[in-house]
Amino acid sequence: MRKQIKRVRATALGMTLAVGLLAGCGKKDAEPTTAEATLAADTTADTSAEPKQTENVTTAEPTTAEPTTVEPTTAEPTTAEPTTEEPTTEVELPTLDANLTPSEAFAEFEQMVLKFRIGKNYYKAVSTMKNPEDYGFSRDELTDYRFVNYNISEKAAEAKTEKKLKEMLDTIDPAGLTDAQKLAYDKLQYEFDIDIRMSEQANLVSPIAPNGEAKNSIFSFCDQLYMLPVETEEDLIGYQKLLETVPVTLREAIEYMQFQLDEYGYYQLPSNIRRAVDNAVFYAKTDPDENPLVDVYKEKIGAMDLPEEVKEEYIKKHNEYVTGELSNQLMKFTRDLQKLNSSSNKTQGLCHYEGGAEYYDVMLRNRLGVEMTPQQIFDYIHGRALANYTLFFLYADTSPDEAEAYATGTYEVPYDRTDVQAIAEYYTKAMAQDYPMELLPAYEISEIPELFRSDTYSAYYIEGRWGDDSPRVIQYDPDMPRFDRFFDTILVHEGFGGHMLQFACAEGNDKATMLTRHFGYTEGWAQYVQCESSKYANMSKEMVTFRLVGLTFGQDLEALADIGVNGLGWSVEDLQDFMAKYGVAKYDAQTMYDDVIALPGRAISYSFGEKKTRDLIEAYKEKYADNLDMKEMHLKYMSIGPTSFDIVEKYFLGE
């Protein structure tokens, strides 16, 4: 059987840690769990007892442990210098007609923003819109076939254009806009402000981060190729051109990493480099029967209505490129990575690098959609983690039988755990009393192709394109449901009540703002619904609590680790001391340290976003207690669409 590709993403503690903690509950002579939790742990620790949060911002020393280096390949490094494209000037923007009303001017401005954000990028256009021509994009103009752009001069030009757009937006009087336009206006103001602030900081995004951010990593390109709709022969030509730009992206990624190292001393985590090398080698197979990209292409073209001889010609050209030129470029990429890896010997939290503290601060504001410092975010999350830890063991002590059933996964649910369709039908019906399930788009459920299966990603939702009435898709790993006690809630997170319903409710919003996915809002909502779903499965209060805590506790701890290491300057020892209070072993804390350096800010979106979403909904319930309609409340929240929580609060809780 072919080797399976791992999705090389940071492994969240969300489920496993909480389950591990409970596994020993209710047993007087229980052995410590894998997280070395004990019922004797101090659950009343004061938040002031954190390890040197403030002092470590400036005084914490980098870890002295030598990072593991990548084993060299037998291929010799190339001596050719990477080519650098000529700097690109910022986009020339048209002016707004002074005779237009504010509403007319804003409508024209929105289209301008959409054109800027799509640009000439073929992939952005065809993956976002079923027919780009319907939105003012001619395919002849979509000449940039790169998946990801790491060109430094182009990024600088984009930042200048963002500032010009922000200045233009400021000339429009929001008082003359429709209600829908006022929401879009506020969203764009926030997005431009955050983008401009981010561009002013040291850009420390890692091109080789496992799974990247929102299709922002070179190793998501295979996933993107698989999901890209290919329906016509014109699409096939575009598909081939996309594939042929992969070497350009690989080259830019190396140049970008070298720039980070030269300018900021930023060092990519050794484990990321190892994974990047492994993946590149896997995609570089020269045997067509072993190359995963060959399989992807065969599946695409096999479903098309073309003469067999035409299909064979396309496949021949594709296979020659994939197993020839692309394979060579991927192997060159692995050698370049290893040369970069040998040029530095330290890895540490973002705040220790030049510009890193400022970058981390504004990155969190962007991801979470709040104007809070890392320390304030830490305190906000830590309060719940501490309360959940106490509640966790209180319920385990008073309900030992249910704690045992939860820990072993033997508690009853009103559906077949392994029947995905049955789970979907159950929750769609059960949650309809409180959620606008009638707005769910048509959907299909299918298995994740073997090529993309992993031990950390059991299900995900494939978003539809604008103007496409095709059913949305939830893909799942058929090997996961039997072992993952939270698989049913993951399906809710991705689809029924979660992302699928969320985007259906917001898709009437302006398209220009929907291109920006604010993770605090989007993942916060889906995580909230995932946690709430247990209430609709006719479980006891204790079991609902166990599942709720199991879904949030580990993610809260990982989020706290992320902020401590990347924002407050914790050393490994600081993190181990903090986690010991929650029963986490030193070895597991070391793993957490590496994970949060590899993907700074990722886990916080789920942890912070869920808590903020819950707090806003509780505030709504209190404000409208005398006339509360749960379905109306949830619809109002989702209809706002992705943006900052300040804007959500304004439109959700405002009159």
Image (cartoon, rainbow, N blue to C red):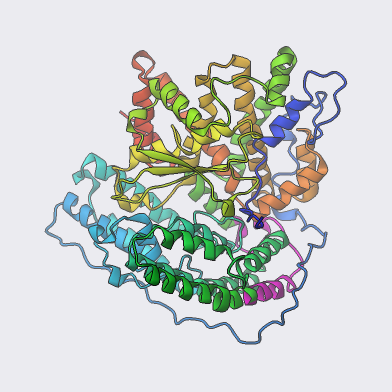
Q: Is residue 342 magenta?
A: yes
Q: Give the quarter of the figure containing the N terminus.
A: bottom right
Q: Nearer the viewer, residue 103 or 258?
A: 258
The residue drawn where x is 51% and y is 69% is: 150
Left or right: 159, with 130 as reference point: right
Q: Is residue 87 visible?
A: yes
With respect to residue 397, does 202 lie above or below? below
Q: Give the quarter of the figure containing the C terminus.
A: top left
Left or right: 34, with 15 as reference point: right
**Residue 411 occupies which quadrant of the picture?**
top right
Q: Position of residue 568 (x, y in %)?
A: 67, 48
With respect to residue 191, does 20 lie above or below? above
- State the extent of the magenta-drawn residues as a range: 332-357
The residue drawn where x is 15% and y is 60% is: 98
Q: Position of residue 247 (x, y in %)?
A: 53, 75
Left or right: 15, with 526 as reference point: right
**Residue 236 occupies which quadrant of the picture?**
bottom left
With respect to residue 485, does 201 lie above or below? below
Left or right: 454, with 179 as reference point: right
Looking at the rendered structure, the number of numbered marks drawn on it comes to: 0
Q: Nearer the viewer, residue 102 or 555?
A: 555
The residue drawn where x is 61% and y is 53% is: 7
Q: Position of residue 593 (x, y in %)?
A: 73, 49
Q: Is residue 341 magenta?
A: yes
Q: Is residue 612 visible?
A: no
With respect to residue 470, does 245 lie above or below? below
Q: Position of residue 435 (x, y in %)?
A: 39, 26
Q: Nearer the viewer, residue 21 or 470?
A: 470
